[in-house]
Image (tube, rainbow, N blue to C red):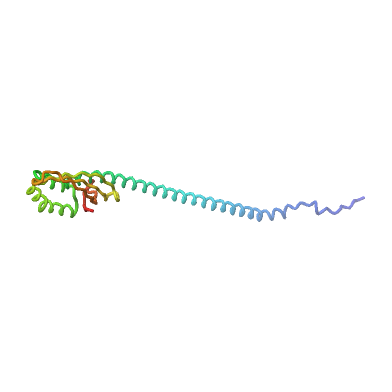
Amino acid sequence: MLRRRGKRDKRSEPEGPSRLSSLPARLKRGSTAVRTRTEHLLRTRRRRVVAAILLLVVLAGAAGGLWWAGERAAAAETARAEALEAARGDVVALLSYDFRTVEQSLPAAAENLTGPFHDDYTKLAQDVVIPAAKEQQTTTSTAVSRAGVISAGPDDVTALMFLNQTTTTGADPNPKLSGSRIRVELERVDGDWRISALTPL
């Protein structure tokens, strides 16, 4: 006696073909998601790298600015000391003379001057100071009692000086003491400090 074949349970049938047919779409979606995530990570990383580079540039610029300011301040401080030392010696040479050697000493002192002041001082010495010193047998000694820098740059300095002068003449050998203040302007010329102006105050 033949048995009927029962109907096969559809639930037991494999769903392979339908799942396989949808696999490419799922793979495509997964690939797209991975690519999107990767691109996002790369963009984030690039932004971080760019931000880090910009930060380094800013820090380097700030460090460079501080270094430059420090170098400029150091150069100005060196200029102050060197110019003030030069001014002390040069002012004494310019304003001190002995009638017996004045013709040699004042032209030598003028070598420490620069610009129009060099010519003005030389003319004054030749036309007025030297003839008067020889005629009156004048001797003048100058000393710097105090000195300080008013302003300073790497190549120019202005100083204030307080002077004491002692003068004798043939007619009056008793020393006469006088005091004065002067403003001295100096410029760096070929590495040396030279006086460019001297103004009584």
Image quadrant assignment for residue 120 = bottom left
Number of numbered labels in the structure image: 0
Left or right: 145 with respect to 96? Answer: right
Left or right: 44 with respect to 129? Answer: right
Residue drawn at x 49%, y 51% is: 51
Task: Judge by depth and name the residue closer to the eye, 180 or 124.
Answer: 180
Q: Position of residue 14 (x, y in %)?
A: 76, 51
Residue drawn at x 34%, y 47% is: 73
Q: Position of residue 119 (x, y in %)?
A: 15, 53
Task: Judge by depth and name the residue closer to the eye, 153 or 51.
Answer: 153
* Residue occupying the far right of the picture: 1
Residue 162 shows up from this direction = yes
Residue 156 shows up from this direction = no
Residue drawn at x 66%, y 56% is: 25
Q: Position of residue 105 (x, y in %)?
A: 12, 45
Q: Position of residue 44 (x, y in %)?
A: 54, 52
